[in-house]
Amino acid sequence: MTAHATIPNDYAPAPGLLEGRVILVTGAGQGLGRAVALACAAHGATVALLGRTPKKLEATADAIEAAGGAEPLLAPLDLAKANAGEFEQLAHLLRREAKRLDGIAHCASHFVPLTPLANQTPDQWLALLRVNLVAPHALTRACLPMLIAAPDASVVFVGETHGLNPAAFWGGFAVAKSALPALAAIWADELEGAGKPRMNVIVPGPIATPQRRMSHPGEDPAGLRRPESVATAFLYLLGPDGSAVSGRTCVL
Ligand SMILES: NC(=O)c1ccc[n+]([C@@H]2O[C@H](COP(=O)([O-])OP(=O)(O)OC[C@H]3O[C@@H](n4cnc5c(N)ncnc54)[C@H](OP(=O)(O)O)[C@@H]3O)[C@@H](O)[C@H]2O)c1
């Protein structure tokens, strides 16, 4: 069974929490990924921004620099199409340009509108599995030597409620997300030991983002949590305050 952990609701990250660290954030062009990238940069990290749309990454980078953060590294990549060589190239770019890597927040996500399994095509499933499951593994795998070399590295996968409690119409999206707690637990078990990279999953619950508008059209976003408030939980796991937590699934 998946082991759970709790992130304190009132967690208040110290101002320079991630000073000197380099954090890769996927899906950094909008929604949760953008908020996590801004929060990491605001707490001293240099961030590498990965996403499909260069213009959105540039906008996130501009916002980070306007707020006084370090100049981010931009890494446009389509995770639905990336092959093993491209994941290695990305790790090579990070090694060359940033010299180190202390964490990854896997916020990129591919979603298709809710529909019965019988309506979902193999091509849709391949895209869902590639972006939501294969890419988090492949990217972490390519970056693992840098993560192991860092003194307190931390990887955060992003799960989804229906990955834990499957329900009708969530289809291949929920199936892909359901594997992330196992991925984190297996990797944490393999890497167990002081100073080894930590591997955890955050299940954020409903957040006011473009994906939520797609899964729940017509819902008033005013009652939902803002991505900025959810980003604080990522700081807990990415920084030293979460150093005792690995192999866990944290439901917010
Ligand atoms: N929003 C919620 O209520 C909610 C609830 C539970 C869990 N989550 C999880 O939280 C995470 C963030 O979700 P979100 O709501 O912020 O989603 P979102 O607004 O849809 O953003 C997803 C991001 O992923 C990127 N992306 C999608 N396909 C990609 C691809 N093929 N290659 C590279 N990047 C790609 C998008 O880039 P482009 O914009 O360039 O396409 C976008 O920046 C996801 O893992 C999601 O499942 C969200």
Image (tube, grey):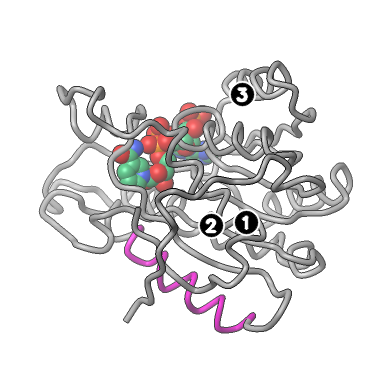
Give the magenta range: 177-191
Q: What residue type is labelled 2?
A: Val
State the CA–CA distance, disc 3 to disc 1.
Answer: 21 Å
Residue at 49 percent of width and 57 percent of height = 157
Q: Give the x, y percent position of residue 2.
A: 35, 76
Q: Give the x, y percent position of residue 114.
A: 18, 41
In the picture, the disc for residue 156 is 2
Q: How many labels does the image show?
A: 3
Placement of 169 over or under 165, stated as above or below? above
Q: Which amino acid does label 3 sit on?
A: Thr
> Is-magenta flag for residue 56?
no
Q: Which amino acid does label 1 sit on?
A: Leu
Q: Is mark 3 on a helix, strand or loop?
A: helix
Mark 1, residue position? 139
State the CA–CA distance, disc 2 to disc 1.
Answer: 12 Å
Q: Which of marks 2 and 3 is nearer the N terminus?
A: 3
Residue at 65 percent of width and 55 percent of height = 239
Residue at 56 percent of width and 26 percent of height = 53
Placement of 184 over or under 172, stated as above or below? below
